[in-house]
């Protein structure tokens, strides 16, 4: 399944957020979206999931424009995992995942729906949490449940908005490894907005660096995460190490060199 974003623009009122954003995602790829706070990473993810409606441009799924597709049909293809997994109403883990079956449900859940839920519970190793209250779980457990809910949709593309931002280092790696395995073993694809450049470099095979609502650089992690690019966009001097052909960033100090808004 191929996703193509062509010239997307979005504004909150008179405030422009996204400017002429273009990108492509192929089957079995993970694309990381990086950039400083406020550059439009989360907004782009929400536009792709049709939570927000772009002012201009097109989003195509296998050549078909998303906004012309039935919302339920889109939900069968694209799953969204938000940054904040908490919910204000009580629900068991099982019932939370069952919500992901909504695009496929008739009047009531079937044995097939129950089987799908049991499959994703087992896949993510959270079978023992099935009857627990979602709100009583740890941050890492909640994030696994939200991934399970997206998988229950049988989506082929997963969208993640800062999925590791509130997790400790072990749970960060667990979540990223789960996504990596889904891509390798099931041929799924993922787009992930991330703050941690090293996590993005370690797991993504494509990356876009955003600044001021546009794309500053795009390519593989080695071509995007350079000393000059990081200095220009983040205003930080870094050293780069290399492991298995991927750059790893060591922050050194802040610097005065940073792009002006007019430079993009």
Image (tube, rainbow, N blue to C red):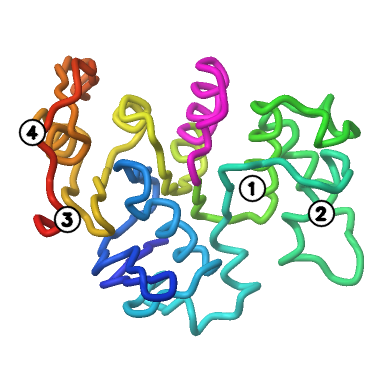
Real-space CA distance between mark 3 and mark 4, rounded to the nearest whole angstrom? 17 Å
Is there a contact, CB below 8 Å, between mark 1 and mark 2? Answer: no
Mark 1 vs mark 4: in front: 4
Give the mark nearest the N terminus, 2 or 3: 2
Q: Residue at x 13, y 57 (%)?
A: 264
Is disc 2 surrounded by few (<14), some (14 to 19) or many (20+) residues within 10 Å?
A: some
| Circle number at residue 261 | 3
Classify residue 153 as left or right of residue 69: right
- Whichever of callouts 1 and 4 sits on the residue coming sooner in the sequence is 1
Disc ID at residue 151: 1
Query: In the image, what residue occupies the spot 84% across and 24% down?
Result: 128
Dot 2 corresponds to which residue?
113
Report which quarter residue 57 is drawn in: bottom left
Mark 1 residue crowding within 10 angstroms, few (<14) / some (14–19) / many (20+): many
Q: Which of marks 4 and 2 is in front?
A: 4
Q: Specify whether 228 is left or right of 35.
A: left
Image marks 1 and 4: residues in contact by CB distance under 8 Å: no
Considering the whole magenta stretch, tell me its main secondary structure.
helix
Do the numbered discs 3 and 1 sit on residues whose CB atoms are within 8 Å? no
Query: Magenta residues?
Result: 161-180
């Amino acid at each position: 399944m191929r996703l193509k974003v062509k010239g997307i623009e979005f504004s909150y009122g008179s405030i422009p957020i996204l400017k002429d954003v273009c990108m492509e995602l192929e089957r079995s790829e993970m694309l990381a979206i990086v950039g400083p706070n406020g550059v439009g990473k989360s907004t782009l993810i929400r536009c792709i999931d049709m939570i927000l409606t772009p002012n201009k441009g097109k989003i195509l799924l296998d050549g078909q424009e998303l906004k012309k597709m039935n919302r339920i049909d889109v939900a069968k293809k694209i799953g969204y995992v938000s940054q904040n997994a908490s919910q204000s109403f009580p629900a068991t883990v099982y019932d939370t995942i069952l919500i992901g079956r909504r695009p496929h449900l008739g009047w009531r859940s079937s044995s097939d729906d129950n089987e799908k839920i049991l499959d994703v519970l087992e896949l993510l190793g959270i079978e023992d949490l099935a009857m627990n209250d979602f709100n009583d779980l740890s941050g890492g457990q909640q994030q696994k449940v939200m991934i399970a809910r997206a998988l229950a949709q049988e989506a082929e593309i997963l969208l993640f908005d800062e999925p590791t931002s509130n997790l400790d280092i072990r749970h960060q790696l667990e979540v990223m490894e789960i996504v990596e395995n889904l891509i390798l073993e099931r041929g799924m694809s993922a787009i992930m907005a991330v703050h941690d450049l090293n996590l993005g470099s370690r797991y993504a095979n494509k990356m876009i660096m955003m600044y001021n609502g546009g794309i500053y650089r795009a390519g593989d992690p080695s071509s995007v995460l350079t000393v000059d690019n990081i200095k220009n966009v983040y205003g930080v001097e870094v050293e780069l190490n290399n492991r298995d052909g991927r750059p790893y960033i060591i922050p050194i100090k802040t610097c005065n060199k940073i792009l002006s808004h007019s430079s993009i």
